[in-house]
Image (cartoon, rainbow, N blue to C red):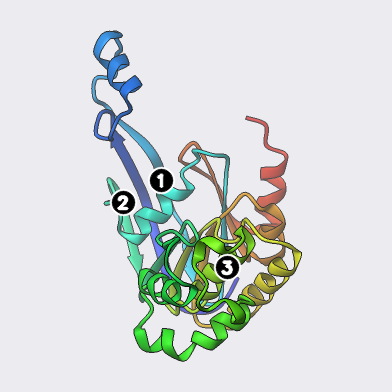
Amino acid sequence: MSDGAVTLRTGGLVKAFTAGTHRRTLFQFLRDRFVRRSTNGRPRASLDGIDIEARAGEIIGIIGENGAGKTTLLKTIAGLYAPTAGRIEINGEVALLAGLGAGMVEELSVADNIRLYGAICRLHRRTIRDHFAHILAWSELEGFVDAELRTLSTGMRTRLAFAIAMHVDSELVLMDEAFSAGDKRFQEKCDRFFDDTKRLPRTLLVATHNLEFVRNFCDRTLWLHKGRQMAFGPTTEVLPRYETFAP
């Protein structure tokens, strides 16, 4: 565990959603209208009693099956959801990177998308300007600066979005499967980025299904199952338990 300053601490964190408060599909509307069901409007806990601490210089993995609460946790820490109970303490600025490249526009050029997605990632205009050439070089798109985004392959778009996002300098960065796509060369470049991150005074929380990433880069790991905290501690202790878990 890093001996850096504490950047995040949660205590007894609970997030519950009340049935019927979300936008429904037509099927759900008809089902609720004509099929007798007993919901009583009771809240459903998506997170139930999360107690974690994160420090500068750490990469913390968040693992669990689909629906375990990983994304809900990141959004609650980021302030998109208000906690139902418990507390969240954050020291510094927090940035949520969910859906790598979300918000980029197909019809705009690579150059314009660098500025646009940089703004979405809350990068200052000066930061975007100062690192513009590096973003193009890292993403290997120097010859495509005027090309429309829609002409790029999926791999090229992924490299571009990651090259922009890696310049976020918040003390606490929350990532949701941000590097799940890409070829071997891209993964190697990402690996170098995560190695370098451990030498910086910031914390990464990464929700992922990529257990090799967790094994290789995460100092500690949080394991969620149906919104509950199954374990939080050194990755060497948590990951083997998760891999042998049979619900």
Location of the C terminus by quadrant is: top right
Q: Which residue is mark 3?
A: 59
- On screen, residue 15 versus residue 71, left or right, reads left
Q: What amino acid is found at the position of numbered circle 2 in the picture? A: Gly
> Distance of mark 2 from mark 1, alpha carbons?
8 Å
Disc marking residue 86: 2
In the image, 186 versus 192, the foreground residue is 186
On screen, 32 above or below 199? above
Q: Position of residue 213 (x, y in %)?
A: 68, 60
Task: Tell us which disc is closer to us: 2 or 3.
Answer: 3
SS type, badge 3: strand
Q: Mark 3 or mark 1, which has the lower sequence index?
A: 1
Q: Which residue is mark 1?
A: 49
> Distance of mark 3 from mark 1, alpha carbons?
21 Å
Q: What amino acid is found at the position of numbered circle 1 in the picture? A: Gly
Residue at the spot x=63%, y=57% of the render? 181
Q: Position of residue 96 (x, y in %)?
A: 41, 63
Q: Position of residue 142 (x, y in %)?
A: 60, 82
In the image, 1 versus 56, the foreground residue is 56
Residue at the spot x=58%, y=53% of the render? 208
Total residue callouts: 3
Q: What amino acid is found at the position of numbered circle 3 in the picture? A: Ile
Q: Mark 2 or mark 3, which has the lower sequence index?
A: 3
- On screen, residue 17 versus residue 55, left or right, reads left
In the image, 215 versus 168, the foreground residue is 168
User: Local crowd at mark 2 within 10 Å, few (<14), some, or many (≥20)?
Assistant: some
Residue at the spot x=50%, y=82% of the render? 201
* Circles 2 and 1: CB atoms closer than 8 Å: yes
Location of the N terminus by quadrant is: bottom right
Q: Position of residue 24 (x, y in %)?
A: 30, 29
On screen, 39 above or below 17? above
